[in-house]
Image (spheres, rainbow, N blue to C red):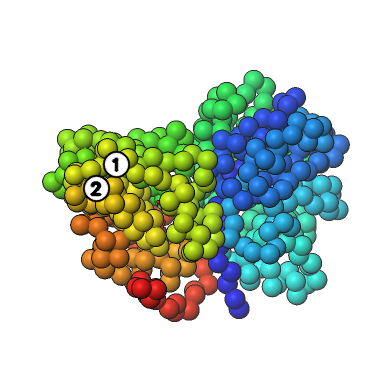
Amino acid sequence: MHFRRPEEECGIFGIFNHPEASNLTYLGLYALQHRGQESCGIVSSDGQGLHSHKSMGLVADVFGNQEIFKNLPGRAAIGHVRYSTTGASVLKNIQPILVDYSRGSIAVAHNGNIVNAQIIKDELEAWGSIFQTTMDTEIIVHLLATSKTSSLVERITDALNRIKGAYCLLFLTETRMVAVRDPHGFRPLCLGKQGDAYVVASESCALDLIEAQFIREIEPGEIVVIDKNGVTSHFPFKKAEPTPCIFEFVYFSRPDSYIFGRNVYQVRKELGRQLAREHRIDADIVIPVPDSGVPSALGYAEESGIRFELGLIRNHYVGRTFIEPQQSIRHFGVKIKLNPVREVLEGKRVIVIDDSIVRGTTSRKIVKMVRNAGAKEVHVLISSPPTSYPCYYGIDTPNRKELISSSHTIEEINRYITADSLGYLSREGLLHSVGTENSSYCRACFSGEYPVKFPMLGPEPQLDLFEKE
Ligand code: AMP
Protein backbone atom coordinates (compact mmCIF):
# COMPACT_ATOMS: atom_id res chain seq x y z
CA MET A 1 0.00 0.00 0.00
CA HIS A 2 1.38 3.42 -0.74
CA PHE A 3 0.90 6.39 1.50
CA ARG A 4 0.60 9.81 -0.04
CA ARG A 5 2.44 12.70 1.54
CA PRO A 6 0.11 15.22 3.09
CA GLU A 7 -0.28 18.23 0.93
CA GLU A 8 -2.82 20.46 2.52
CA GLU A 9 -2.37 23.77 4.20
CA CYS A 10 -5.70 25.42 4.00
CA GLY A 11 -8.13 27.99 5.26
CA ILE A 12 -11.91 27.74 5.30
CA PHE A 13 -14.65 30.32 5.67
CA GLY A 14 -18.45 30.18 5.54
CA ILE A 15 -21.38 32.47 6.13
CA PHE A 16 -25.08 31.67 6.45
CA ASN A 17 -28.05 34.04 6.09
CA HIS A 18 -26.46 37.14 4.64
CA PRO A 19 -27.62 38.95 1.48
CA GLU A 20 -24.01 39.31 0.34
CA ALA A 21 -22.79 35.87 1.36
CA SER A 22 -20.34 35.26 -1.47
CA ASN A 23 -18.89 38.79 -1.28
CA LEU A 24 -18.22 38.39 2.42
CA THR A 25 -16.75 34.94 1.82
CA TYR A 26 -14.36 36.58 -0.63
CA LEU A 27 -13.28 38.99 2.12
CA GLY A 28 -13.01 36.15 4.64
CA LEU A 29 -10.75 34.21 2.30
CA TYR A 30 -8.70 37.32 1.74
CA ALA A 31 -7.98 37.43 5.48
CA LEU A 32 -7.04 33.74 5.39
CA GLN A 33 -4.75 34.01 2.37
CA HIS A 34 -1.70 33.18 4.50
CA ARG A 35 -3.14 29.66 4.98
CA GLY A 36 -2.92 28.86 1.28
CA GLN A 37 -1.94 30.72 -1.82
CA GLU A 38 -2.15 28.22 -4.63
CA SER A 39 -5.85 28.15 -5.38
CA CYS A 40 -9.18 29.19 -3.96
CA GLY A 41 -12.89 28.78 -4.47
CA ILE A 42 -16.36 29.75 -3.29
CA VAL A 43 -19.61 27.78 -3.44
CA SER A 44 -22.85 29.66 -2.72
CA SER A 45 -26.41 28.54 -2.14
CA ASP A 46 -29.51 30.42 -3.24
CA GLY A 47 -31.80 27.97 -1.47
CA GLN A 48 -32.54 26.04 -4.67
CA GLY A 49 -29.11 25.03 -5.88
CA LEU A 50 -25.38 25.49 -5.37
CA HIS A 51 -23.12 27.68 -7.49
CA SER A 52 -19.36 27.48 -7.71
CA HIS A 53 -16.40 29.51 -8.86
CA LYS A 54 -12.84 28.35 -8.27
CA SER A 55 -9.47 28.74 -9.88
CA MET A 56 -5.72 28.66 -9.38
CA GLY A 57 -4.26 31.84 -7.92
CA LEU A 58 -4.57 34.30 -5.08
CA VAL A 59 -7.99 35.30 -3.75
CA ALA A 60 -7.82 38.85 -5.14
CA ASP A 61 -6.88 37.54 -8.58
CA VAL A 62 -9.53 34.84 -8.71
CA PHE A 63 -12.36 36.99 -7.30
CA GLY A 64 -11.15 40.47 -8.27
CA ASN A 65 -13.86 40.87 -10.91
CA GLN A 66 -17.24 41.84 -9.41
CA GLU A 67 -19.06 40.11 -12.29
CA ILE A 68 -18.11 36.74 -10.75
CA PHE A 69 -20.39 37.38 -7.79
CA LYS A 70 -23.44 37.53 -10.07
CA ASN A 71 -22.84 33.83 -10.61
CA LEU A 72 -22.55 33.18 -6.87
CA PRO A 73 -26.04 34.20 -5.70
CA GLY A 74 -27.73 33.41 -2.42
CA ARG A 75 -27.62 34.01 1.30
CA ALA A 76 -25.08 31.28 2.15
CA ALA A 77 -21.56 30.53 0.94
CA ILE A 78 -18.45 28.59 1.87
CA GLY A 79 -14.93 29.17 0.62
CA HIS A 80 -11.49 27.65 0.70
CA VAL A 81 -7.88 28.71 0.19
CA ARG A 82 -5.46 25.94 -0.60
CA TYR A 83 -1.75 25.45 -0.56
CA SER A 84 -0.56 22.29 -2.16
CA THR A 85 2.54 20.69 -3.50
CA THR A 86 0.88 18.38 -6.01
CA GLY A 87 1.95 18.74 -9.59
CA ALA A 88 -0.11 18.19 -12.68
CA SER A 89 -3.48 17.44 -11.17
CA VAL A 90 -3.93 20.70 -9.34
CA LEU A 91 -6.85 22.16 -11.31
CA LYS A 92 -9.34 19.47 -10.48
CA ASN A 93 -8.21 19.52 -6.85
CA ILE A 94 -9.34 23.05 -6.09
CA GLN A 95 -11.88 23.23 -3.27
CA PRO A 96 -14.68 23.44 -2.23
CA ILE A 97 -15.68 20.15 -3.85
CA LEU A 98 -19.22 20.30 -5.20
CA VAL A 99 -21.20 17.14 -6.00
CA ASP A 100 -24.74 16.10 -6.80
CA TYR A 101 -25.91 12.88 -5.24
CA SER A 102 -29.18 11.09 -4.56
CA ARG A 103 -30.24 13.59 -1.89
CA GLY A 104 -29.33 16.83 -3.65
CA SER A 105 -26.16 18.86 -3.89
CA ILE A 106 -23.45 19.23 -1.31
CA ALA A 107 -20.21 21.19 -1.21
CA VAL A 108 -17.33 20.60 1.17
CA ALA A 109 -14.22 22.55 2.13
CA HIS A 110 -11.50 20.86 4.20
CA ASN A 111 -8.51 22.01 6.22
CA GLY A 112 -6.31 19.23 7.50
CA ASN A 113 -5.19 15.83 6.37
CA ILE A 114 -6.75 12.39 6.56
CA VAL A 115 -4.19 9.76 7.52
CA ASN A 116 -6.13 6.63 6.53
CA ALA A 117 -7.23 8.12 3.20
CA GLN A 118 -5.49 5.58 1.00
CA ILE A 119 -6.99 2.59 2.78
CA ILE A 120 -10.53 3.92 2.51
CA LYS A 121 -10.01 4.99 -1.07
CA ASP A 122 -8.80 1.50 -2.02
CA GLU A 123 -11.89 0.01 -0.36
CA LEU A 124 -14.28 2.42 -2.04
CA GLU A 125 -12.70 1.84 -5.43
CA ALA A 126 -12.97 -1.90 -4.96
CA TRP A 127 -16.72 -1.32 -4.49
CA GLY A 128 -16.92 0.67 -7.71
CA SER A 129 -16.49 4.29 -6.59
CA ILE A 130 -14.88 6.52 -9.18
CA PHE A 131 -12.75 9.36 -7.85
CA GLN A 132 -12.46 12.61 -9.76
CA THR A 133 -9.71 14.23 -7.73
CA THR A 134 -6.64 13.05 -5.84
CA MET A 135 -7.77 14.84 -2.69
CA ASP A 136 -8.45 13.12 0.60
CA THR A 137 -11.52 15.28 0.95
CA GLU A 138 -13.34 13.48 -1.85
CA ILE A 139 -13.38 10.35 0.30
CA ILE A 140 -15.64 12.12 2.79
CA VAL A 141 -18.10 12.93 0.02
CA HIS A 142 -18.18 9.30 -1.15
CA LEU A 143 -18.69 7.99 2.39
CA LEU A 144 -21.44 10.52 2.96
CA ALA A 145 -23.22 9.64 -0.28
CA THR A 146 -23.17 5.92 0.46
CA SER A 147 -24.24 6.21 4.11
CA LYS A 148 -27.51 4.40 4.84
CA THR A 149 -28.55 6.82 7.60
CA SER A 150 -31.25 9.41 7.06
CA SER A 151 -30.34 12.86 8.42
CA LEU A 152 -27.44 14.97 7.18
CA VAL A 153 -25.80 15.03 10.62
CA GLU A 154 -26.04 11.24 10.83
CA ARG A 155 -24.54 10.85 7.37
CA ILE A 156 -21.69 13.23 8.22
CA THR A 157 -21.11 11.38 11.51
CA ASP A 158 -21.21 8.05 9.75
CA ALA A 159 -18.65 9.20 7.18
CA LEU A 160 -16.34 10.83 9.70
CA ASN A 161 -16.38 7.83 12.01
CA ARG A 162 -14.39 6.08 9.28
CA ILE A 163 -11.89 8.90 8.96
CA LYS A 164 -8.72 9.32 11.00
CA GLY A 165 -6.60 12.42 11.08
CA ALA A 166 -7.03 16.15 11.14
CA TYR A 167 -10.00 17.93 9.71
CA CYS A 168 -11.93 21.12 9.96
CA LEU A 169 -14.78 20.87 7.49
CA LEU A 170 -17.46 23.13 6.13
CA PHE A 171 -20.38 21.58 4.28
CA LEU A 172 -22.98 23.53 2.35
CA THR A 173 -26.28 22.19 1.07
CA GLU A 174 -29.17 24.13 -0.46
CA THR A 175 -30.53 24.91 3.01
CA ARG A 176 -27.81 24.30 5.58
CA MET A 177 -24.22 24.98 6.49
CA VAL A 178 -22.44 22.46 8.70
CA ALA A 179 -19.08 22.97 10.42
CA VAL A 180 -17.06 20.11 11.93
CA ARG A 181 -13.84 20.01 13.95
CA ASP A 182 -12.19 16.63 14.41
CA PRO A 183 -12.23 15.04 17.88
CA HIS A 184 -8.57 15.96 18.46
CA GLY A 185 -9.12 19.56 17.34
CA PHE A 186 -5.86 19.71 15.39
CA ARG A 187 -6.78 22.80 13.38
CA PRO A 188 -8.49 25.96 14.64
CA LEU A 189 -12.09 26.83 13.77
CA CYS A 190 -14.30 29.54 15.20
CA LEU A 191 -17.90 30.69 15.12
CA GLY A 192 -19.02 34.30 14.79
CA LYS A 193 -22.05 36.43 14.11
CA GLN A 194 -22.59 39.34 11.77
CA GLY A 195 -26.06 40.81 12.22
CA ASP A 196 -28.45 37.91 11.55
CA ALA A 197 -25.77 35.86 9.81
CA TYR A 198 -23.57 33.17 11.32
CA VAL A 199 -19.96 32.92 10.26
CA VAL A 200 -17.42 30.09 10.56
CA ALA A 201 -13.71 30.64 9.90
CA SER A 202 -10.36 28.93 10.36
CA GLU A 203 -9.07 31.96 12.21
CA SER A 204 -10.70 34.87 14.00
CA CYS A 205 -8.84 37.42 11.84
CA ALA A 206 -11.37 36.59 9.09
CA LEU A 207 -14.24 37.53 11.42
CA ASP A 208 -12.55 40.84 12.23
CA LEU A 209 -12.32 41.85 8.59
CA ILE A 210 -16.04 41.46 7.97
CA GLU A 211 -16.85 43.02 11.36
CA ALA A 212 -18.36 39.82 12.68
CA GLN A 213 -18.47 39.29 16.39
CA PHE A 214 -16.45 36.34 17.71
CA ILE A 215 -18.80 33.96 19.55
CA ARG A 216 -16.56 31.03 20.43
CA GLU A 217 -14.25 28.38 19.07
CA ILE A 218 -15.89 25.27 17.68
CA GLU A 219 -15.02 22.45 20.08
CA PRO A 220 -12.97 19.39 19.18
CA GLY A 221 -15.45 16.71 18.05
CA GLU A 222 -18.28 19.19 17.56
CA ILE A 223 -20.67 19.37 14.63
CA VAL A 224 -22.36 22.75 14.29
CA VAL A 225 -25.43 22.91 12.05
CA ILE A 226 -26.58 26.32 10.90
CA ASP A 227 -29.93 26.65 9.15
CA LYS A 228 -33.02 28.84 9.20
CA ASN A 229 -33.69 27.78 12.79
CA GLY A 230 -30.30 29.04 13.98
CA VAL A 231 -27.40 27.06 15.40
CA THR A 232 -27.49 23.54 16.83
CA SER A 233 -24.53 21.71 18.24
CA HIS A 234 -23.86 17.95 18.23
CA PHE A 235 -21.13 15.82 19.79
CA PRO A 236 -21.61 12.43 18.14
CA PHE A 237 -18.00 11.20 18.15
CA LYS A 238 -16.15 9.17 20.71
CA LYS A 239 -14.31 11.59 22.95
CA ALA A 240 -10.60 11.96 22.26
CA GLU A 241 -7.84 13.89 23.91
CA PRO A 242 -7.67 17.36 22.33
CA THR A 243 -4.31 17.84 20.60
CA PRO A 244 -4.38 21.20 18.84
CA CYS A 245 -1.40 21.87 16.59
CA ILE A 246 1.30 23.82 18.38
CA PHE A 247 2.83 24.86 15.06
CA GLU A 248 -0.23 27.06 14.44
CA PHE A 249 1.15 29.21 17.28
CA VAL A 250 4.74 28.99 16.11
CA TYR A 251 4.25 29.86 12.47
CA PHE A 252 1.06 29.16 10.70
CA SER A 253 -1.75 31.32 12.13
CA ARG A 254 -1.84 35.07 11.85
CA PRO A 255 -0.65 36.92 14.98
CA ASP A 256 -3.90 38.88 15.25
CA SER A 257 -5.93 35.65 15.47
CA TYR A 258 -7.31 34.10 18.60
CA ILE A 259 -6.94 30.32 18.44
CA PHE A 260 -6.98 27.50 21.00
CA GLY A 261 -7.94 29.97 23.71
CA ARG A 262 -5.07 32.37 23.10
CA ASN A 263 -3.97 35.32 21.00
CA VAL A 264 -1.21 34.19 18.65
CA TYR A 265 0.79 37.42 18.94
CA GLN A 266 1.02 37.18 22.70
CA VAL A 267 2.08 33.54 22.50
CA ARG A 268 4.80 34.37 19.96
CA LYS A 269 6.07 37.22 22.09
CA GLU A 270 6.26 34.86 25.03
CA LEU A 271 8.23 32.39 22.88
CA GLY A 272 10.75 35.21 22.36
CA ARG A 273 10.91 36.00 26.07
CA GLN A 274 11.49 32.33 26.84
CA LEU A 275 14.17 32.20 24.14
CA ALA A 276 15.94 35.06 25.93
CA ARG A 277 15.77 33.17 29.24
CA GLU A 278 17.27 30.11 27.59
CA HIS A 279 19.85 31.81 25.34
CA ARG A 280 21.61 34.88 26.73
CA ILE A 281 23.87 36.27 24.07
CA ASP A 282 26.17 39.25 24.21
CA ALA A 283 24.96 41.29 21.25
CA ASP A 284 24.21 44.86 20.17
CA ILE A 285 20.91 44.38 18.40
CA VAL A 286 18.18 41.79 17.89
CA ILE A 287 16.46 41.68 14.50
CA PRO A 288 13.54 39.54 13.29
CA VAL A 289 13.23 37.65 10.05
CA PRO A 290 10.06 39.39 8.92
CA ASP A 291 7.24 38.66 9.29
CA SER A 292 7.33 35.35 11.10
CA GLY A 293 10.06 36.34 13.56
CA VAL A 294 8.75 39.78 14.56
CA PRO A 295 6.71 39.07 17.72
CA SER A 296 9.36 36.68 19.11
CA ALA A 297 12.15 39.17 18.43
CA LEU A 298 10.14 41.83 20.30
CA GLY A 299 9.74 39.42 23.21
CA TYR A 300 13.43 38.59 23.14
CA ALA A 301 14.38 42.28 23.13
CA GLU A 302 12.03 43.03 26.01
CA GLU A 303 13.34 40.20 28.16
CA SER A 304 17.05 40.62 27.36
CA GLY A 305 17.21 44.41 27.20
CA ILE A 306 18.97 44.15 23.82
CA ARG A 307 17.78 46.76 21.31
CA PHE A 308 15.20 45.68 18.73
CA GLU A 309 15.90 46.82 15.18
CA LEU A 310 14.60 46.09 11.72
CA GLY A 311 17.70 44.91 9.92
CA LEU A 312 15.90 43.07 7.16
CA ILE A 313 13.16 44.65 5.10
CA ARG A 314 10.57 42.51 3.46
CA ASN A 315 8.96 43.00 0.10
CA HIS A 316 5.34 42.45 0.99
CA TYR A 317 4.26 41.54 -2.49
CA VAL A 318 6.14 38.25 -2.41
CA GLY A 319 4.33 35.26 -0.96
CA ARG A 320 5.71 32.80 1.53
CA THR A 321 9.04 31.26 0.51
CA PHE A 322 7.50 27.83 0.24
CA ILE A 323 5.33 28.76 -2.72
CA GLU A 324 8.19 28.08 -5.07
CA PRO A 325 8.38 24.33 -5.23
CA GLN A 326 11.92 24.00 -6.54
CA GLN A 327 15.04 24.25 -4.47
CA SER A 328 16.75 26.42 -7.10
CA ILE A 329 13.98 29.02 -7.11
CA ARG A 330 13.61 28.89 -3.35
CA HIS A 331 17.26 29.86 -2.99
CA PHE A 332 16.56 32.87 -5.13
CA GLY A 333 13.29 33.54 -3.30
CA VAL A 334 14.89 34.65 -0.05
CA LYS A 335 16.67 37.48 -1.87
CA ILE A 336 13.53 38.53 -3.64
CA LYS A 337 11.76 38.71 -0.33
CA LEU A 338 14.33 40.25 2.03
CA ASN A 339 16.92 42.99 1.80
CA PRO A 340 19.30 44.03 4.61
CA VAL A 341 19.65 47.57 6.00
CA ARG A 342 23.39 48.20 6.04
CA GLU A 343 23.04 51.28 8.28
CA VAL A 344 21.45 49.11 10.98
CA LEU A 345 23.78 46.13 10.74
CA GLU A 346 27.26 47.52 10.03
CA GLY A 347 29.77 46.73 12.77
CA LYS A 348 27.11 45.18 15.00
CA ARG A 349 26.87 41.90 16.87
CA VAL A 350 23.47 40.78 15.63
CA ILE A 351 20.92 38.26 16.90
CA VAL A 352 18.58 37.14 14.12
CA ILE A 353 15.30 35.56 15.22
CA ASP A 354 13.11 33.35 13.07
CA ASP A 355 10.29 30.98 13.99
CA SER A 356 11.67 27.77 12.49
CA ILE A 357 14.28 26.15 10.30
CA VAL A 358 12.93 23.63 7.83
CA ARG A 359 15.52 22.90 5.18
CA GLY A 360 17.96 25.54 6.37
CA THR A 361 17.91 27.42 3.09
CA THR A 362 16.40 30.61 4.50
CA SER A 363 18.70 30.86 7.52
CA ARG A 364 21.79 30.20 5.43
CA LYS A 365 20.88 32.96 3.00
CA ILE A 366 20.00 35.37 5.76
CA VAL A 367 23.23 34.85 7.68
CA LYS A 368 25.20 35.58 4.50
CA MET A 369 23.07 38.61 3.78
CA VAL A 370 23.48 40.06 7.28
CA ARG A 371 27.21 39.42 7.27
CA ASN A 372 27.62 40.97 3.81
CA ALA A 373 25.83 44.04 5.14
CA GLY A 374 28.66 44.50 7.62
CA ALA A 375 27.53 42.65 10.77
CA LYS A 376 30.46 41.70 13.03
CA GLU A 377 28.75 38.63 14.48
CA VAL A 378 25.56 36.84 13.46
CA HIS A 379 23.76 34.67 16.01
CA VAL A 380 20.63 32.82 14.95
CA LEU A 381 17.91 31.99 17.44
CA ILE A 382 14.81 29.98 16.58
CA SER A 383 11.62 30.44 18.57
CA SER A 384 10.72 26.75 18.41
CA PRO A 385 12.56 23.44 18.89
CA PRO A 386 14.22 21.68 15.93
CA THR A 387 11.60 20.56 13.38
CA SER A 388 12.73 16.97 12.98
CA TYR A 389 9.56 15.14 11.96
CA PRO A 390 7.07 15.66 9.12
CA CYS A 391 3.50 16.70 9.87
CA TYR A 392 0.77 14.30 8.79
CA TYR A 393 -2.05 16.50 9.98
CA GLY A 394 -2.14 19.33 7.49
CA ILE A 395 0.97 21.48 7.79
CA ASP A 396 3.04 21.20 4.69
CA THR A 397 6.41 20.14 6.01
CA PRO A 398 8.69 18.30 3.64
CA ASN A 399 9.56 14.66 4.14
CA ARG A 400 12.20 13.69 6.68
CA LYS A 401 14.99 13.74 4.17
CA GLU A 402 14.50 17.45 3.63
CA LEU A 403 14.12 18.39 7.28
CA ILE A 404 17.62 19.45 8.18
CA SER A 405 17.30 18.73 11.88
CA SER A 406 16.05 15.19 11.35
CA SER A 407 19.55 14.08 10.49
CA HIS A 408 21.87 16.80 11.73
CA THR A 409 22.97 18.09 15.09
CA ILE A 410 22.63 21.74 16.03
CA GLU A 411 26.39 22.14 15.55
CA GLU A 412 26.16 20.72 12.04
CA ILE A 413 23.24 22.96 11.17
CA ASN A 414 25.11 25.92 12.54
CA ARG A 415 28.06 25.06 10.35
CA TYR A 416 25.72 24.83 7.36
CA ILE A 417 24.04 28.17 7.95
CA THR A 418 27.46 29.69 8.78
CA ALA A 419 26.29 31.56 11.89
CA ASP A 420 28.48 32.40 14.87
CA SER A 421 26.01 30.51 17.01
CA LEU A 422 22.64 28.82 16.67
CA GLY A 423 20.11 28.19 19.40
CA TYR A 424 16.62 26.71 19.49
CA LEU A 425 13.86 27.06 22.03
CA SER A 426 13.60 23.96 24.20
CA ARG A 427 10.52 21.72 23.99
CA GLU A 428 9.76 22.50 27.63
CA GLY A 429 10.14 26.21 26.91
CA LEU A 430 7.68 25.97 24.04
CA LEU A 431 5.10 24.15 26.15
CA HIS A 432 5.59 26.55 29.02
CA SER A 433 5.03 29.52 26.67
CA VAL A 434 1.81 28.24 25.10
CA GLY A 435 0.48 27.06 28.46
CA THR A 436 -0.80 23.52 28.66
CA GLU A 437 -3.55 23.89 31.22
CA ASN A 438 -6.33 23.43 28.62
CA SER A 439 -4.74 21.10 26.12
CA SER A 440 -2.05 18.63 25.39
CA TYR A 441 -0.83 20.06 22.12
CA CYS A 442 0.21 18.04 19.10
CA ARG A 443 3.93 18.65 18.82
CA ALA A 444 4.76 15.71 16.60
CA CYS A 445 6.90 17.89 14.31
CA PHE A 446 9.27 18.42 17.23
CA SER A 447 8.96 15.16 19.16
CA GLY A 448 7.89 12.49 16.66
CA GLU A 449 5.02 11.50 18.96
CA TYR A 450 2.02 11.35 16.65
CA PRO A 451 -1.34 11.52 18.47
CA VAL A 452 -3.20 9.77 15.63
CA LYS A 453 -1.47 6.74 14.21
CA PHE A 454 -0.98 6.34 10.48
CA PRO A 455 0.59 3.88 8.08
CA MET A 456 4.33 4.15 8.63
CA LEU A 457 6.74 5.31 5.98
CA GLY A 458 9.82 3.28 5.25
CA PRO A 459 13.29 4.52 6.14
CA GLU A 460 14.20 7.63 4.22
CA PRO A 461 17.60 8.67 2.90
CA GLN A 462 19.38 11.42 4.77
CA LEU A 463 19.97 14.94 3.57
CA ASP A 464 23.54 15.55 2.49
CA LEU A 465 24.03 19.19 3.44
CA PHE A 466 27.17 19.85 1.55
CA GLU A 467 26.51 17.68 -1.51
CA LYS A 468 26.46 20.63 -3.92
CA GLU A 469 29.60 22.24 -2.60
P1 AMP B 1 13.81 26.76 5.17
O1 AMP B 1 14.46 27.74 4.29
O2 AMP B 1 13.38 25.54 4.40
O3 AMP B 1 14.61 26.41 6.39
O4 AMP B 1 12.45 27.40 5.67
C1 AMP B 1 12.41 28.18 6.82
C2 AMP B 1 11.40 29.28 6.68
O5 AMP B 1 10.14 28.75 6.27
C3 AMP B 1 11.19 30.00 7.99
O6 AMP B 1 11.42 31.37 7.77
C4 AMP B 1 9.74 29.73 8.37
O7 AMP B 1 9.11 30.92 8.77
C5 AMP B 1 9.11 29.20 7.12
N1 AMP B 1 8.25 28.01 7.34
C6 AMP B 1 8.29 27.13 8.34
N2 AMP B 1 7.35 26.16 8.19
C7 AMP B 1 6.71 26.44 7.04
C8 AMP B 1 5.63 25.82 6.33
N3 AMP B 1 5.05 24.71 6.77
N4 AMP B 1 5.21 26.39 5.19
C9 AMP B 1 5.81 27.51 4.73
N5 AMP B 1 6.83 28.12 5.35
C10 AMP B 1 7.28 27.61 6.49
Which residue was labeled with disc 2?
Answer: 374
- Visible residue check, residue 61: yes
Determine whether the beta carbon of the residue marked 2 sits less than 8 angstroms from the nearest atom of ligand 1. no
**The disc labelled 1 sits on which kind of residue?**
Arg
Give the crowd class for mark 2: few <14, some 14-19, many >=20 residues within 10 Å.
some
Which residue was labeled with disc 1?
Answer: 342
Horizontal side of residue 210 vs 158, given as left or right: left
Q: Is residue 6 above or below residue 22?
A: below
Task: Please report the residue visible at 64 percent of the width from the left and 64 percent of the height from the top.
Answer: 87
Horizontal side of residue 15 vs 31, given as left or right: right
Q: Is residue 156 above or below residue 264?
A: below
Could you tell me residue 275's position as x and y percent?
24, 46
- Visible residue check, residue 433: no
Helix, strand or loop under label 2: loop
Q: Which mark is residue 185?
A: none
Query: Does the residue at mark 1 contact the one at mark 2 (Cβ under 8 Å)?
Result: yes
Horizontal side of residue 407 vs 351, given as left or right: right
Task: Please report the residue visible at 19 percent of the width from the left and 44 percent of the height from the top.
Answer: 348
Ligand 1 is found in which quarter of the picture?
A: bottom left
User: How many angstroms separate mark 1 from mark 2 (CA)?
Assistant: 7 Å
Determine whether the beta carbon of the residue marked 1 sits less than 8 angstroms from the nearest atom of ligand 1. no
* Most foreground residue, 39 or 249: 39
Task: Please report the residue visible at 34 percent of the width from the left and 44 percent of the height from the top.
Answer: 340
- Quadrant (top left, top right, bottom left, bottom right) of the N terminus: bottom right
**The disc labelled 2 sits on which kind of residue?**
Gly
Helix, strand or loop under label 1: helix
Horizontal side of residue 40 vs 452, given as left or right: right
- Quadrant (top left, top right, bottom left, bottom right) of the C terminus: bottom left
